[in-house]
Image: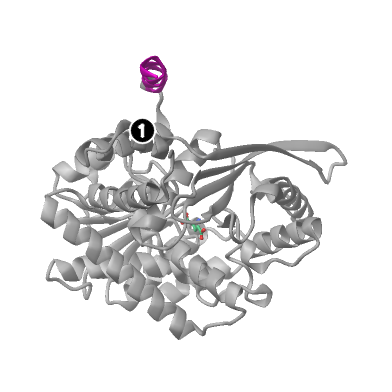
Amino acid sequence: MGADNKLAASTTANETGMWAETKDRIRQIGKTLKLDEGVVDVLLKPEREMTVRVTITGDDGKLHSYEGYRVQHSSVRGPYKGGIRYHPSVTIDETRALAALMSLKCATVNIPYGGAKGGLQCDPSKWSKRELQSATREYATLIAPIIGPMRDIPAPDVNTNSQIIAWMGDAVSTVSGNPSPATFTGKPIALWGSVGRDAATGNGVAVATQRYVEMQGKSLQGMTAAVQGFGKVGLYSALGLAERGAKIMVVSDVSGGLICKDGFDLQRLCDHARSQPGALLCDYHGSEAAHISNEELLAADVDILVPAAMEDQITGANAGQVRAKIVSEGANGPVSTEGDRILEQRGIAVIPDILANSGGVVVSYFEWVQNLQGMFWDGDEVNARLDTVMTRATKDIVTYAQANGVSLRSAAFAVSVNRIVEALLLRGTGH
Ligand code: GLU
Protein backbone atom coordinates (compact mmCIF):
# COMPACT_ATOMS: atom_id res chain seq x y z
CA MET A 1 0.00 0.00 0.00
CA GLY A 2 2.82 2.36 0.96
CA ALA A 3 4.54 1.63 -2.36
CA ASP A 4 1.33 2.27 -4.30
CA ASN A 5 0.96 5.60 -2.64
CA LYS A 6 4.56 6.56 -3.42
CA LEU A 7 3.96 5.65 -7.06
CA ALA A 8 0.79 7.73 -7.10
CA ALA A 9 2.66 10.64 -5.57
CA SER A 10 5.48 10.46 -8.10
CA THR A 11 3.12 10.22 -11.09
CA THR A 12 1.22 13.28 -9.97
CA ALA A 13 4.35 15.35 -9.38
CA ASN A 14 4.70 16.32 -13.05
CA GLU A 15 1.05 16.94 -13.74
CA THR A 16 -0.05 20.40 -14.73
CA GLY A 17 -3.35 21.95 -15.69
CA MET A 18 -6.73 22.19 -14.11
CA TRP A 19 -6.96 18.59 -12.84
CA ALA A 20 -3.54 18.78 -11.17
CA GLU A 21 -4.51 22.12 -9.60
CA THR A 22 -7.89 20.82 -8.43
CA LYS A 23 -6.23 17.77 -6.83
CA ASP A 24 -3.66 20.01 -5.14
CA ARG A 25 -6.43 22.14 -3.69
CA ILE A 26 -8.23 19.01 -2.41
CA ARG A 27 -4.98 17.66 -0.87
CA GLN A 28 -4.37 21.01 0.79
CA ILE A 29 -7.85 21.05 2.32
CA GLY A 30 -7.38 17.42 3.39
CA LYS A 31 -4.28 18.51 5.34
CA THR A 32 -5.99 21.52 6.88
CA LEU A 33 -8.99 19.43 7.96
CA LYS A 34 -6.62 16.66 9.14
CA LEU A 35 -8.44 14.05 7.05
CA ASP A 36 -7.15 10.49 6.66
CA GLU A 37 -5.16 9.87 3.49
CA GLY A 38 -7.66 7.22 2.42
CA VAL A 39 -10.53 9.67 2.73
CA VAL A 40 -8.70 12.29 0.66
CA ASP A 41 -7.95 9.60 -1.90
CA VAL A 42 -11.69 9.05 -2.41
CA LEU A 43 -11.98 12.69 -3.49
CA LEU A 44 -8.92 12.53 -5.72
CA LYS A 45 -10.12 9.60 -7.82
CA PRO A 46 -13.33 9.62 -9.87
CA GLU A 47 -15.65 6.67 -9.21
CA ARG A 48 -16.24 5.93 -12.89
CA GLU A 49 -14.98 7.23 -16.24
CA MET A 50 -16.28 6.50 -19.70
CA THR A 51 -14.47 7.35 -22.94
CA VAL A 52 -16.57 7.22 -26.10
CA ARG A 53 -15.92 7.66 -29.81
CA VAL A 54 -18.63 9.58 -31.59
CA THR A 55 -18.71 8.91 -35.33
CA ILE A 56 -20.92 10.84 -37.72
CA THR A 57 -21.34 11.18 -41.46
CA GLY A 58 -20.38 14.77 -42.25
CA ASP A 59 -22.12 16.93 -44.83
CA ASP A 60 -19.14 16.11 -47.07
CA GLY A 61 -20.33 12.46 -47.12
CA LYS A 62 -17.23 11.29 -45.17
CA LEU A 63 -17.02 9.74 -41.70
CA HIS A 64 -15.66 11.95 -38.92
CA SER A 65 -15.04 10.86 -35.36
CA TYR A 66 -14.54 12.66 -32.06
CA GLU A 67 -13.50 11.58 -28.58
CA GLY A 68 -15.89 12.23 -25.72
CA TYR A 69 -16.05 11.53 -22.00
CA ARG A 70 -18.38 11.22 -19.05
CA VAL A 71 -16.57 11.30 -15.72
CA GLN A 72 -18.58 10.42 -12.60
CA HIS A 73 -16.54 11.78 -9.74
CA SER A 74 -18.64 11.16 -6.64
CA SER A 75 -22.04 9.71 -5.79
CA VAL A 76 -21.52 9.95 -2.03
CA ARG A 77 -24.21 12.62 -1.50
CA GLY A 78 -26.60 11.58 -4.29
CA PRO A 79 -26.85 10.92 -8.04
CA TYR A 80 -24.04 12.27 -10.21
CA LYS A 81 -24.81 15.71 -11.65
CA GLY A 82 -23.07 17.96 -14.12
CA GLY A 83 -23.03 19.45 -17.59
CA ILE A 84 -21.68 18.34 -20.96
CA ARG A 85 -19.42 20.68 -22.94
CA TYR A 86 -18.43 20.76 -26.59
CA HIS A 87 -15.03 22.37 -27.13
CA PRO A 88 -11.76 21.65 -28.95
CA SER A 89 -9.84 21.87 -25.65
CA VAL A 90 -11.88 19.15 -23.89
CA THR A 91 -9.63 16.42 -22.45
CA ILE A 92 -10.14 13.59 -19.97
CA ASP A 93 -8.15 15.53 -17.35
CA GLU A 94 -10.18 18.71 -17.79
CA THR A 95 -13.37 16.62 -17.53
CA ARG A 96 -12.07 15.02 -14.31
CA ALA A 97 -11.35 18.44 -12.82
CA LEU A 98 -14.77 19.77 -13.77
CA ALA A 99 -16.47 16.61 -12.41
CA ALA A 100 -14.69 17.01 -9.06
CA LEU A 101 -15.69 20.69 -8.96
CA MET A 102 -19.33 19.61 -9.51
CA SER A 103 -19.17 17.31 -6.43
CA LEU A 104 -17.81 20.22 -4.40
CA LYS A 105 -20.28 22.70 -5.93
CA CYS A 106 -23.33 20.57 -5.10
CA ALA A 107 -22.03 20.12 -1.55
CA THR A 108 -21.26 23.85 -1.19
CA VAL A 109 -24.89 24.78 -1.90
CA ASN A 110 -26.09 21.64 -0.08
CA ILE A 111 -28.18 20.05 -2.82
CA PRO A 112 -28.47 16.25 -2.78
CA TYR A 113 -26.13 15.36 -5.63
CA GLY A 114 -22.67 14.07 -6.30
CA GLY A 115 -20.66 15.37 -9.23
CA ALA A 116 -19.97 14.47 -12.86
CA LYS A 117 -19.01 16.13 -16.12
CA GLY A 118 -19.10 15.25 -19.78
CA GLY A 119 -17.32 16.60 -22.80
CA LEU A 120 -16.90 16.11 -26.51
CA GLN A 121 -13.64 17.23 -28.11
CA CYS A 122 -14.92 19.10 -31.14
CA ASP A 123 -15.50 22.54 -32.61
CA PRO A 124 -19.28 22.79 -32.91
CA SER A 125 -19.04 26.15 -34.71
CA LYS A 126 -17.77 24.19 -37.73
CA TRP A 127 -20.82 21.90 -37.81
CA SER A 128 -24.09 22.29 -39.66
CA LYS A 129 -27.24 21.83 -37.59
CA ARG A 130 -27.59 18.29 -38.95
CA GLU A 131 -24.00 17.40 -37.98
CA LEU A 132 -24.54 18.89 -34.51
CA GLN A 133 -27.68 16.82 -34.01
CA SER A 134 -25.99 13.64 -35.29
CA ALA A 135 -22.99 13.99 -32.97
CA THR A 136 -25.27 14.86 -30.05
CA ARG A 137 -27.52 11.82 -30.51
CA GLU A 138 -24.51 9.55 -30.90
CA TYR A 139 -22.80 10.88 -27.78
CA ALA A 140 -26.02 10.56 -25.73
CA THR A 141 -26.62 7.00 -26.96
CA LEU A 142 -23.08 6.03 -26.00
CA ILE A 143 -23.36 7.35 -22.43
CA ALA A 144 -26.99 6.13 -22.03
CA PRO A 145 -26.02 3.00 -20.04
CA ILE A 146 -24.57 5.07 -17.19
CA ILE A 147 -27.09 7.92 -16.87
CA GLY A 148 -30.64 8.19 -15.50
CA PRO A 149 -32.75 10.18 -13.03
CA MET A 150 -31.33 8.44 -9.93
CA ARG A 151 -27.93 7.73 -11.49
CA ASP A 152 -26.44 10.62 -13.37
CA ILE A 153 -28.28 13.69 -14.62
CA PRO A 154 -26.44 15.64 -17.35
CA ALA A 155 -27.15 19.26 -18.26
CA PRO A 156 -25.78 21.95 -20.61
CA ASP A 157 -22.34 23.52 -20.23
CA VAL A 158 -19.99 25.40 -22.59
CA ASN A 159 -21.37 25.38 -26.18
CA THR A 160 -24.36 23.18 -25.34
CA ASN A 161 -27.93 24.39 -24.79
CA SER A 162 -31.54 23.33 -24.31
CA GLN A 163 -31.91 22.24 -27.96
CA ILE A 164 -28.89 19.93 -27.62
CA ILE A 165 -30.29 18.56 -24.35
CA ALA A 166 -33.65 17.96 -26.09
CA TRP A 167 -31.91 15.85 -28.78
CA MET A 168 -29.99 13.96 -26.08
CA GLY A 169 -33.20 13.24 -24.15
CA ASP A 170 -34.91 12.00 -27.30
CA ALA A 171 -31.98 9.73 -28.23
CA VAL A 172 -31.87 8.20 -24.74
CA SER A 173 -35.66 7.65 -24.61
CA THR A 174 -35.47 5.97 -28.00
CA VAL A 175 -32.80 3.55 -26.76
CA SER A 176 -34.60 2.79 -23.48
CA GLY A 177 -38.16 2.80 -24.84
CA ASN A 178 -39.32 5.14 -22.03
CA PRO A 179 -39.66 8.88 -21.87
CA SER A 180 -37.54 9.93 -18.90
CA PRO A 181 -37.68 13.69 -18.43
CA ALA A 182 -35.70 13.69 -15.18
CA THR A 183 -32.63 12.14 -16.88
CA PHE A 184 -31.48 15.55 -18.14
CA THR A 185 -31.88 19.10 -16.91
CA GLY A 186 -31.62 22.32 -18.87
CA LYS A 187 -34.35 21.08 -21.22
CA PRO A 188 -36.57 23.42 -23.26
CA ILE A 189 -39.69 24.55 -21.36
CA ALA A 190 -41.86 22.67 -23.87
CA LEU A 191 -40.09 19.43 -22.92
CA TRP A 192 -40.34 19.53 -19.09
CA GLY A 193 -37.68 22.23 -18.64
CA SER A 194 -37.86 24.75 -15.82
CA VAL A 195 -38.66 28.41 -16.13
CA GLY A 196 -35.57 30.40 -15.09
CA ARG A 197 -32.97 27.73 -15.94
CA ASP A 198 -31.38 29.75 -18.77
CA ALA A 199 -30.77 32.76 -16.54
CA ALA A 200 -29.99 30.74 -13.40
CA THR A 201 -26.18 30.68 -13.42
CA GLY A 202 -25.95 34.43 -14.08
CA ASN A 203 -28.66 35.21 -11.54
CA GLY A 204 -26.81 33.09 -9.00
CA VAL A 205 -23.58 35.03 -9.67
CA ALA A 206 -25.49 38.25 -8.99
CA VAL A 207 -27.08 36.93 -5.75
CA ALA A 208 -23.80 35.52 -4.37
CA THR A 209 -21.99 38.79 -5.18
CA GLN A 210 -24.78 40.89 -3.64
CA ARG A 211 -24.87 38.83 -0.42
CA TYR A 212 -21.08 38.88 -0.12
CA VAL A 213 -21.04 42.67 -0.57
CA GLU A 214 -23.85 43.06 2.00
CA MET A 215 -21.94 40.94 4.50
CA GLN A 216 -19.11 43.50 4.16
CA GLY A 217 -21.61 46.18 5.22
CA LYS A 218 -21.79 47.60 1.67
CA SER A 219 -24.29 47.67 -1.18
CA LEU A 220 -24.06 46.86 -4.89
CA GLN A 221 -25.78 50.17 -5.62
CA GLY A 222 -23.38 52.29 -7.67
CA MET A 223 -20.58 49.70 -7.76
CA THR A 224 -18.96 49.18 -11.15
CA ALA A 225 -18.42 45.83 -12.86
CA ALA A 226 -16.60 44.20 -15.79
CA VAL A 227 -17.93 40.95 -17.23
CA GLN A 228 -15.73 38.70 -19.35
CA GLY A 229 -17.84 36.54 -21.69
CA PHE A 230 -21.15 37.42 -23.27
CA GLY A 231 -22.66 33.94 -23.46
CA LYS A 232 -25.57 32.98 -21.22
CA VAL A 233 -23.59 33.17 -17.97
CA GLY A 234 -21.93 36.52 -18.74
CA LEU A 235 -25.08 38.10 -20.10
CA TYR A 236 -27.32 37.13 -17.17
CA SER A 237 -24.59 37.96 -14.63
CA ALA A 238 -24.44 41.45 -16.15
CA LEU A 239 -28.23 41.78 -16.16
CA GLY A 240 -28.50 40.44 -12.59
CA LEU A 241 -25.83 42.80 -11.25
CA ALA A 242 -27.37 45.76 -13.10
CA GLU A 243 -30.81 44.89 -11.67
CA ARG A 244 -29.25 45.10 -8.20
CA GLY A 245 -27.84 48.57 -8.83
CA ALA A 246 -24.36 47.89 -10.24
CA LYS A 247 -23.08 49.73 -13.30
CA ILE A 248 -21.76 47.43 -16.05
CA MET A 249 -18.79 49.32 -17.45
CA VAL A 250 -16.96 46.62 -19.40
CA VAL A 251 -18.10 43.55 -21.32
CA SER A 252 -16.35 41.16 -23.69
CA ASP A 253 -16.70 38.08 -25.87
CA VAL A 254 -14.21 36.04 -27.92
CA SER A 255 -13.82 38.97 -30.32
CA GLY A 256 -12.66 41.47 -27.66
CA GLY A 257 -14.04 43.93 -25.14
CA LEU A 258 -16.12 47.08 -24.95
CA ILE A 259 -15.96 49.81 -22.34
CA CYS A 260 -18.52 52.48 -21.50
CA LYS A 261 -17.58 54.73 -18.55
CA ASP A 262 -21.23 55.64 -17.84
CA GLY A 263 -22.38 52.03 -17.78
CA PHE A 264 -23.95 50.11 -20.66
CA ASP A 265 -27.57 50.03 -21.65
CA LEU A 266 -27.53 46.23 -21.63
CA GLN A 267 -30.69 46.00 -23.72
CA ARG A 268 -28.84 47.54 -26.68
CA LEU A 269 -26.02 45.00 -26.33
CA CYS A 270 -28.56 42.16 -26.07
CA ASP A 271 -30.33 43.39 -29.21
CA HIS A 272 -26.98 43.39 -31.00
CA ALA A 273 -26.10 39.88 -29.71
CA ARG A 274 -29.47 38.58 -30.94
CA SER A 275 -29.38 40.48 -34.25
CA GLN A 276 -27.93 37.43 -36.03
CA PRO A 277 -26.52 34.02 -35.06
CA GLY A 278 -22.88 34.37 -34.06
CA ALA A 279 -23.08 38.19 -33.70
CA LEU A 280 -19.88 39.47 -32.04
CA LEU A 281 -19.18 42.50 -29.86
CA CYS A 282 -16.34 43.61 -32.20
CA ASP A 283 -19.13 44.48 -34.67
CA TYR A 284 -20.98 46.65 -32.14
CA HIS A 285 -20.51 50.31 -33.04
CA GLY A 286 -22.64 52.25 -30.54
CA SER A 287 -21.12 55.70 -29.95
CA GLU A 288 -21.10 55.17 -26.16
CA ALA A 289 -18.64 52.27 -26.37
CA ALA A 290 -14.90 52.03 -27.02
CA HIS A 291 -13.23 48.78 -28.06
CA ILE A 292 -10.60 47.30 -25.72
CA SER A 293 -8.59 44.06 -25.54
CA ASN A 294 -9.23 41.10 -23.26
CA GLU A 295 -6.15 42.03 -21.20
CA GLU A 296 -7.51 45.56 -20.73
CA LEU A 297 -10.83 44.09 -19.60
CA LEU A 298 -9.15 41.98 -16.90
CA ALA A 299 -7.24 45.06 -15.69
CA ALA A 300 -10.27 47.40 -15.80
CA ASP A 301 -10.66 49.87 -12.94
CA VAL A 302 -13.93 48.48 -11.56
CA ASP A 303 -15.17 47.17 -8.21
CA ILE A 304 -16.25 43.74 -9.45
CA LEU A 305 -14.76 41.50 -12.13
CA VAL A 306 -16.81 38.53 -13.35
CA PRO A 307 -14.76 36.11 -15.47
CA ALA A 308 -17.60 34.20 -17.17
CA ALA A 309 -15.83 32.76 -20.21
CA MET A 310 -13.39 29.85 -19.90
CA GLU A 311 -10.86 28.50 -17.42
CA ASP A 312 -7.38 29.90 -16.71
CA GLN A 313 -8.04 33.53 -17.56
CA ILE A 314 -6.43 35.04 -14.46
CA THR A 315 -3.01 33.48 -13.94
CA GLY A 316 0.40 34.27 -12.47
CA ALA A 317 1.04 36.35 -15.59
CA ASN A 318 -1.81 38.85 -15.20
CA ALA A 319 -3.21 38.59 -11.63
CA GLY A 320 -0.95 41.49 -10.65
CA GLN A 321 -2.84 43.76 -13.06
CA VAL A 322 -6.36 43.05 -11.75
CA ARG A 323 -7.76 46.25 -10.24
CA ALA A 324 -11.19 44.98 -9.14
CA LYS A 325 -11.70 44.42 -5.41
CA ILE A 326 -13.97 41.42 -5.90
CA VAL A 327 -13.62 38.64 -8.49
CA SER A 328 -16.80 36.61 -8.85
CA GLU A 329 -16.15 33.41 -10.82
CA GLY A 330 -18.94 32.94 -13.36
CA ALA A 331 -16.95 30.35 -15.32
CA ASN A 332 -15.51 27.13 -13.90
CA GLY A 333 -11.82 27.50 -12.99
CA PRO A 334 -11.15 30.97 -14.46
CA VAL A 335 -8.43 31.72 -11.85
CA SER A 336 -5.36 29.45 -11.73
CA THR A 337 -3.74 28.47 -8.42
CA GLU A 338 -0.92 30.97 -8.95
CA GLY A 339 -3.41 33.66 -9.99
CA ASP A 340 -5.42 32.91 -6.86
CA ARG A 341 -2.35 33.21 -4.64
CA ILE A 342 -1.51 36.62 -6.09
CA LEU A 343 -5.09 37.91 -5.77
CA GLU A 344 -5.24 36.74 -2.15
CA GLN A 345 -1.91 38.40 -1.36
CA ARG A 346 -3.23 41.63 -2.89
CA GLY A 347 -6.36 41.51 -0.73
CA ILE A 348 -8.73 40.88 -3.64
CA ALA A 349 -11.68 38.70 -2.61
CA VAL A 350 -12.45 35.80 -4.95
CA ILE A 351 -15.97 34.37 -4.74
CA PRO A 352 -15.09 30.88 -6.00
CA ASP A 353 -16.81 29.11 -8.90
CA ILE A 354 -18.20 26.35 -6.69
CA LEU A 355 -20.24 29.03 -4.93
CA ALA A 356 -20.57 31.90 -7.41
CA ASN A 357 -21.71 29.92 -10.45
CA SER A 358 -23.74 27.27 -8.64
CA GLY A 359 -27.08 28.89 -9.58
CA GLY A 360 -27.18 26.77 -12.74
CA VAL A 361 -27.05 23.46 -10.94
CA VAL A 362 -29.38 24.77 -8.23
CA VAL A 363 -32.11 25.46 -10.79
CA SER A 364 -31.23 22.13 -12.47
CA TYR A 365 -32.06 20.58 -9.11
CA PHE A 366 -35.38 22.47 -9.08
CA GLU A 367 -36.08 21.23 -12.62
CA TRP A 368 -35.40 17.62 -11.53
CA VAL A 369 -37.65 18.01 -8.47
CA GLN A 370 -40.44 19.41 -10.66
CA ASN A 371 -39.99 16.55 -13.16
CA LEU A 372 -40.11 13.87 -10.46
CA GLN A 373 -43.27 15.44 -9.04
CA GLY A 374 -44.83 16.10 -12.45
CA MET A 375 -45.50 19.69 -11.30
CA PHE A 376 -44.29 23.03 -12.60
CA TRP A 377 -43.34 26.14 -10.65
CA ASP A 378 -43.64 29.67 -11.96
CA GLY A 379 -40.69 32.06 -12.42
CA ASP A 380 -41.26 33.84 -9.12
CA GLU A 381 -41.11 30.58 -7.20
CA VAL A 382 -37.95 29.42 -8.99
CA ASN A 383 -36.18 32.74 -8.46
CA ALA A 384 -37.23 33.08 -4.82
CA ARG A 385 -35.98 29.56 -4.08
CA LEU A 386 -32.73 30.26 -5.98
CA ASP A 387 -32.22 33.38 -3.87
CA THR A 388 -32.81 31.39 -0.67
CA VAL A 389 -30.31 28.66 -1.58
CA MET A 390 -27.62 31.10 -2.84
CA THR A 391 -28.04 33.41 0.15
CA ARG A 392 -27.73 30.56 2.64
CA ALA A 393 -24.67 29.11 0.87
CA THR A 394 -22.95 32.50 0.64
CA LYS A 395 -23.55 33.08 4.36
CA ASP A 396 -22.18 29.60 5.19
CA ILE A 397 -18.99 30.21 3.21
CA VAL A 398 -18.37 33.82 4.26
CA THR A 399 -18.98 32.92 7.91
CA TYR A 400 -16.57 29.97 7.71
CA ALA A 401 -13.94 32.13 5.98
CA GLN A 402 -14.20 34.84 8.65
CA ALA A 403 -14.19 32.39 11.56
CA ASN A 404 -11.12 30.56 10.25
CA GLY A 405 -9.24 33.46 8.67
CA VAL A 406 -9.11 31.77 5.24
CA SER A 407 -10.03 32.76 1.68
CA LEU A 408 -13.54 32.20 0.35
CA ARG A 409 -12.20 29.43 -1.89
CA SER A 410 -10.56 27.60 1.00
CA ALA A 411 -13.79 28.04 2.97
CA ALA A 412 -15.94 26.64 0.16
CA PHE A 413 -13.57 23.69 -0.28
CA ALA A 414 -13.54 23.04 3.48
CA VAL A 415 -17.33 23.27 3.91
CA SER A 416 -18.04 21.08 0.88
CA VAL A 417 -15.36 18.50 1.65
CA ASN A 418 -16.64 18.28 5.24
CA ARG A 419 -20.17 17.62 3.93
CA ILE A 420 -18.98 14.92 1.52
CA VAL A 421 -16.82 13.26 4.18
CA GLU A 422 -19.67 13.28 6.71
CA ALA A 423 -21.88 11.47 4.17
CA LEU A 424 -19.08 9.09 3.22
CA LEU A 425 -18.50 8.03 6.82
CA LEU A 426 -22.23 7.72 7.56
CA ARG A 427 -22.63 5.41 4.58
CA GLY A 428 -20.01 3.07 6.01
CA THR A 429 -18.09 3.11 2.73
CA GLY A 430 -15.13 0.72 2.80
CA HIS A 431 -16.69 -1.32 5.66
N1 GLU B 1 -22.81 23.24 -16.37
C1 GLU B 1 -23.27 23.88 -15.18
C2 GLU B 1 -22.18 23.90 -14.14
O1 GLU B 1 -21.01 23.78 -14.42
C3 GLU B 1 -24.58 23.28 -14.67
C4 GLU B 1 -24.53 21.84 -14.33
C5 GLU B 1 -25.91 21.23 -14.08
O2 GLU B 1 -26.89 21.94 -14.14
O3 GLU B 1 -25.93 20.03 -13.83
O4 GLU B 1 -22.43 24.12 -12.99
| Helix, strand or loop status at disc 1 | helix
Residue at position x 48%, y 56% from top? Answer: 78
Side of 232 where 41 appears, left or right: left
Residue at position x 58%, y 64% from top? Answer: 185
Residue at position x 80%, y 59% from top? Answer: 174
Identify whether 294 is placed above or below 382: above
Q: Amino acid at mark 1?
A: Gly
Q: Quadrant of residue 7?
A: top left
Q: Quadrant of the C terminus?
A: top left
The magenta span reads 1-12
Can residue 379 be seen at all in this image of the molecule?
yes
Give the camera-side residue of 423 and 294: 423
Furthest residue toward front: 431
Side of 315 where 128 appears, left or right: right
Identify whether 429 is placed above or below 264: above
Magenta span dominant secondary structure: helix
Name the residue tied to disc 1.
38
Residue 378 percent across, percent down from the top left: 51, 85
Side of 125 where 357 appears, left or right: left
Side of 138 where 293 appears, left or right: left
